[in-house]
Image: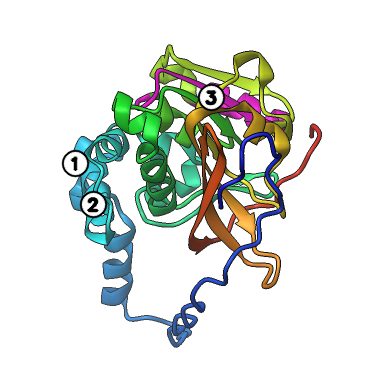
Amino acid sequence: MNDPAGKAPRFPLRLDQVGGQAPAPRKELLRPQAPLQQAHADAARRAAPSGLGLDSADVRRRMVQRLQAQGLQHEAVAAALAEVPRHAFVDAALATQAYEDTSLPIGLGQTISKPSVVARMIELLMHGARARAASGLGRTLEIGTGCGYQAALLARLSRQVLSIERLKPLHDKARENIAPLRIANLRLVYGDGMRGHPPNAPYDSIIAAAGGEALPPAWLEQLAVGGRLVAPLQEPRTNRQVLVVVDRHEAGYEHSVHEAVKFVPLKSGLGG
């Protein structure tokens, strides 16, 4: 959708319905006792791949290879995923699941997104006009720091990253998680993400890890001409979330709709 110059974009965006949901996976039959041999086999599958430590580059490389088999194509995004230790951003009890393609709880009702979803959203950002011209995301605004994993990935693809988190315990935890990585071009802010961050605007890239019924006007105002925004957005007719890409041009805004996703609700204000 293109808006003529001088006219404000109309939001919430009206979205076409995306494809139907996949059938629920079949549940395995539960048994009171499994043979001892089977129990050992199950334990082996839950162990770190090939006996390697979770901090091994090979473990991350295998995750990236699986994502590439699922459709990830951008080499720079793949390289960033291969560098950042995802297990360092989840609770120790869940570390053995860190490189599976699954979301994991990080507390306060929040989750770290599936690697495939993170890869997809960042890849969409990398296809923006400014990102293509500069071979990078430039100045990036992230809404919803969470545990800090996506922020660490963005920092490897951006000139500067500013990441906002409204929940103070998560903001503090993300700072702890990121500190050992010594990322110089990443700044974490405790604040209301729906307001964006005007002091550093405009942003070449904006990415959100929470979805509402409309895109906050502040995000659109703070997006640079030639910049791209990627965020989940609730579809008005079906109440499902889909990924929406917004590109800002001299004449206005253009949006496109992508696959269905499931993110936590977008909220305003600060939380303790």
Residue 182 in the magenta stretch? The answer is: no
The residue sitting at 37% across, 81% down in the picture is 34
**Vertical relation: 37 (above or below) 167:** below
What residue would you read off at disc 1?
Answer: 58
Label 3 crowd (10 A; few <14 / some 14-19 / many >=20): many
User: Which mark is nearer the camera, 3 or 1?
Assistant: 3
Q: Earlier in the sequence, mark 3 or mark 1?
A: 1
Determine whether label 1 and label 2 are within 8 Å by CB: yes
Tag 2's secondary structure?
A: helix
| Residue placed under numbered mark 3 in the picture | 203
Q: Residue at x 48, y 84 (%)?
A: 32
Q: Quadrant of residue 233?
A: bottom right
Circle 3: element type:
strand
Mark found first going from the N terminus, 3 or 2 = 2
Residue 31 in view in this figure? yes
Q: Mark 1 belongs to which amino acid?
A: Asp
Report whether 185 appears left or right of 35: right
> x, y percentage for residue 46?
33, 59
221 left or right of 46? right
* Distance between mark 1 and mark 2 Cα atoms: 9 Å
In the foreground, 41 or 192: 192
Disc nearest the viewer among 3 and 2: 3
How packed is label 2: few (under 14 Cα within 10 Å), some, or many (20 or more)?
A: some
Q: Residue at x 70, y 52 (%)?
A: 212
The kind of residue tagged 3 is: Tyr
In the picture, the disc for residue 49 is 2
Q: Residue at x 40, y 18 (%)?
A: 159
